[in-house]
Image (cartoon, rainbow, N blue to C red):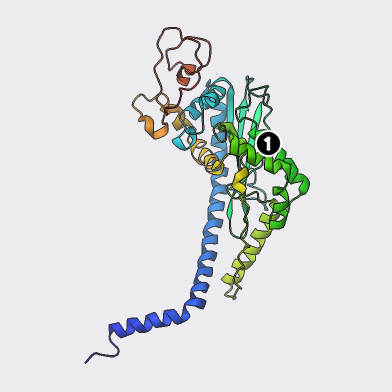
Amino acid sequence: MHDCCGPDSKAHSHSHTMETEAPDVLNARFEELSALEQEFEDIEAEIIRKAEALQAPLYKKRADFVAKIPHFWPLVFEQAPPEIDNFIQPSDSKVFAESLDTFEVLRFELDDPKGSPRSFALKFGFNDNEYFEDKVLEKKFWYRKTKDWAGLVSEPVKIHWKKEKDLTGGLTDAACKLNEVRKKLSTDTSSGAARKEEAKTKEYKRLAQKIETSVEASVSFFGLFAFVSGYRWVSEQESEQAVKEEKERFEKIRQGEKVDEEDDDEEDPQDYQEIEVFPGGDEVATIIAEDMWPNAIKYYRSTFDEDEDDEELSDLDVMDLSDEDDEDDDQEPVDIRALVGKGRKSGPEPPAKKQRKA
């Protein structure tokens, strides 16, 4: 005769209890876990603030030191990891080799109570070059939130290309024109109806069509300056409201108060990635800011490490140049390392990057 209070019976009873309690109990537990997760995120933000405070003097010291090293930053980007290198075409590499002078990552919202330490800017300094007039190109990325999303957004940066030298085939200019319209409309980005009005503009349609028909879309690294979002544009106002509501909700949960379930936003049928010039731009920028920037010396030194496994940092084969004069051929593979004397080329022209293998 089986014991009615045996292990199987207890397990069945516990399972039955969980089933009857599941709707309320599980929802409460999920809410508590979300509140706990938010605490972790708050701590991570504070860690970024403290790390930046500690590292700032070192970055200043490094900047002063590398200013004395010719072509430091071109060589760092030459050794970029595959996630970045895939977007650096020979023409981009030529710009870097000939004119990239300085580079800096700035956490411009560190002291902004309404901002986030996760926001950052990539600031490139250039010498005179044949492609654009700008001496500085700065791309800002804001960390923002909606009710159901959090991530980086950015505004397109105007690049003053010289005649017939636009490496993005007009995509950065088209993205900037749409951004100007967006500002004039003062679109409430939390409103689906308002976003639909933006999608009706000729600038929106022109950019979408240009991306669809352009063979240059997302090829050049400089397309990154047109990046907006992997989600959609989120305004400062929408983000502030979402953060405010989130804090109030989690505070109630911590106090043990019952909170109503959040209403799901109405699904937006608009595909905003049809106007994204540089898909994955947030990931590319994050790798540059969180890997290449703090580890720039490591990337620079790897240029001179003959025994370094090339696949660790780059998918490019760098050829050894001979003492013979090179022929004028745009497709000829060359070695950026020759800029600092690592290669054996003696000509005055700064070399461009080797063509990527198919």
Residue at (46%, 23%) from the top-left corner? 355
The number of numbered badges drawn on the structure is 1
Is any part of residue 300 visible from this angle? yes
User: Which quarter of the figure has residue 313?
Assistant: top left
User: Which quarter of the figure has residue 104?
Assistant: top right
Task: Residue lying at the far left in this picture: please name it.
Answer: 1
Q: Assign the C terminus to one quadrant of the image.
A: top left
Mark 1: which secondary structure? helix
Task: Residue lying at the far bottom in this picture: please name it.
Answer: 1
- In x, y percent, where is residue 238? 69, 56
Q: Assign the N terminus to one quadrant of the image.
A: bottom left
User: Which quarter of the figure has residue 43?
Assistant: bottom right
What residue does disc 1 label?
Answer: 174
Q: Amino acid at mark 1?
A: Ala
- In x, y percent, where is residue 266? 63, 62
Residue at (30%, 89%) from the top-left corner? 5
- In x, y percent, where is residue 199? 69, 48
- In x, y percent, where is residue 7? 28, 83
Is any part of residue 122 visible from this angle? no
Left/right placement of residue 224 relative to residue 312 reads: right
Residue 191 vs residue 236, the one in the foreground: 191
Residue 60 vs residue 219, the one in the foreground: 219
Residue 86 vs residue 296, the one in the foreground: 86
Residue 26 position (above or below residue 132): below
Crowding at label 1, few (<14), some or many (≥20) Cα neighbours within 10 Å? many
Task: Residue lying at the far right in this picture: please name it.
Answer: 184
